[in-house]
Image (cartoon, grey):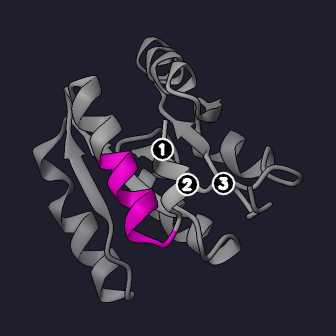
Amino acid sequence: MPKEVGERRILIVEDEPVVADTLRQILSSSGYDTRVAYSAETALSSLSRWSPGLAILDVMLPSMNGIDLAMALKERFPDCRILLMSGQPSVESLLQEARGKGHEFEILAKPVHPTEILDTIAGLFSANGCEHCSQG
């Protein structure tokens, strides 16, 4: 298997520990190498030696929001896929702002069924030329 940067590596950034830890358990049991951060700042500071292939980000984080974090991650890791999750209907203005800066992100509404998130992740990996990353 090629040593691609971030292959099958998923960063989860979610400020609700129960949600983050549950998602980590689901993804780990599906064969993904996962890391969890409970804030955007912690996520950014923890990525010096570990580059994710996918980042699952809660949009409504304290301090830096998930969309700003997504743009920062894309700047540092251009090949990192981004999946946003939100339980808030008010995130459309943040998404529009990101689009204005040339960023288009996939977003899922919370709560998300595990099957839906696993299917979405597999699709994101395979759509970006990482066929072996999506195989469980």
Q: What secondary structure is found at the residue carrying circle 1?
A: loop
Nearer to us: label 3 or label 1: 1
26 left or right, relative to 118? right
Tell me the residue at 81%/49% (across/down). 50
The three-letter amino acid code for the residue at tag 2 is His
Q: Quick check: 41 above or below 39? A: below
Label 1 crowd bin: few (<14), some (14–19), many (20+), radius 10 Å: few
Label 3 crowd bin: few (<14), some (14–19), many (20+), radius 10 Å: many
Callout 2 touching callout 3 (CB < 8 Å): yes
The three-letter amino acid code for the residue at tag 1 is Gln
Tell me the residue at 16%/62% (across/down). 92
Q: What secondary structure is found at the residue carrying circle 3?
A: loop
User: Mark 1 sits on what residue?
Assistant: 135
Q: What secondary structure is found at the residue carrying circle 2?
A: helix
The three-letter amino acid code for the residue at tag 3 is Glu
Considering only order in the chain, which callout, 1 or 3, is on the residue closer to the N terminus?
3
Q: Is residue 72 magenta?
A: no
**C-alpha gap between disc 1 and disc 2:** 5 Å
Q: Nearer the viewer, residue 50 or 71?
A: 50
User: Mark 2 sits on what residue?
Assistant: 132
User: Mark 3 sits on what residue?
Assistant: 7
Q: Quick check: 109 above or below 113? A: below
Q: Is residue 121 magenta?
A: yes
3 left or right, relative to 40? right
| Rendered location of residue 110, percent (x, y) | 20, 32
Q: Nearer the viewer, residue 133 or 105?
A: 133
**C-alpha gap between disc 2 and disc 3:** 9 Å
Quadrant of residue 100 within the rendered picture: bottom left
Q: Quick check: 15 above or below 119? A: above
Considering only order in the chain, which callout, 3 or 2, is on the residue closer to the N terminus?
3
Range covered by the magenta-colored residues: 120-129
